Amino acid sequence: MVRTASASVAAGPTLAVVAREAGVSVPTASKVVNGREDVAPETRRRVTEALDRLGYVRRPRFDATKPPRLVDLVVHSLESSWSGAVLHGVEEAAHDAGLDVVVSASLSRTRADRPQRGWLDKLTTRGSAGVLFNLAELTESQYLWLEQHRIPFVLIDPVVEPPPGVVSVGAANWQGGVTATEHLLALGHERIAVIAGARRKMCSDARVAGYRSALAAAGVAHRPEYVRHGGFDESAARRCMRELLDLPEPPTAVFVCSDRMALGVYEAVAERGLRVPHDVSVVGFDDLPESRWSSPALTTVRQPLAEMAATALRLLVRMMDGERPEGTRTELSTRLVERASTAAPGR
């Protein structure tokens, strides 16, 4: 049977018609429809405009009459206690909601915080109804893909400020920075340094801003040489602490923006024959299990990782049901957990 032009219009445009309209090949048009990322941005734009202009209907790969009860969780790594806490929170909330969860540590080798190309292609194949991204920095094309395929998603502790309208859950990082610094000020410290993660990262910038705000409120002058930036790992923090200890007037206390980084600070202090907290007081951030096991046990700011993950899952369920959260950013409170790594200066 030969399909006439009028019959094609009645049934909706074919992919070949879309490809011809956009001036591309059918395989290229198919890549855009199926969310493949190996397409140039300008080509993707032309195909997307043609799809909308012609009214092309993307066919779901799962039975739309039976809503899937599957969600995806993309984590930064499966090897850290951080991810363990997130998994625990998602699992409990998913159990209550009657959902199954697929967990992926799908990260690129070039950018440790970006999901790999091809991972999104598998999402529609599985028929997942929504996605949680933990510590992920999505590309513009990945945001576009999720929007085009109408897949709801929520970011857990996003690395950078997400685009307007994107729903995210995080901790009160600014207040956590204030709390950590106020604790050290209350002990009598004035020479307080901060070792943060990379610049322009949401949580890092907010914690440093809280630190500066607490100093200003106490009338303590901000010293630029006391602010150091590295990565969220032991080696970067160890390097930053060595630099602080080399200053003519080194700090007597340091607020470290993650527990993992605090372990690197401990190492740098020990290398100089100094002791925590006798010579340098240390406050971390996260309250991971490592903070209790370190010697001395680490005073830290607890951010409720499991609760953040559970909150994100519950928001995602509402979005899967067609609801829209009132606000796009949900912040859970932090609190200081005082242990043995802080004391008055000169103890």
Image (cartoon, rainbow, N blue to C red):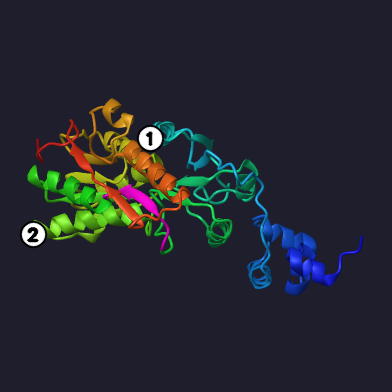
Vertical arrangement, residue 212 with respect to residue 287, above or below: below
Depth check, front residue: 330 or 295:
330
Give the mark, 1 or 2, whose residue is nearer the N terminus.
1
Left or right of 68: which side holds 301? left
For label 1, the residue is 89
Depth check, front residue: 322 or 116:
322
Position of the C terminus by quadrant: top left
Depth check, front residue: 25 or 219:
25
Q: Secondary structure at mark 2?
A: loop
Vertical arrangement, residue 300 with respect to residue 19, above or below: above
For label 2, the residue is 219
Q: Residues within 10 Å of mark 2 (few under 14, many from 20)?
A: few
Q: Secondary structure at mark 1?
A: helix
What's the residue type where badge 2 is placed? Gly
Q: CA gap, disc 1 to disc 2?
A: 40 Å
Give the magenta part as a residue range.
165-172
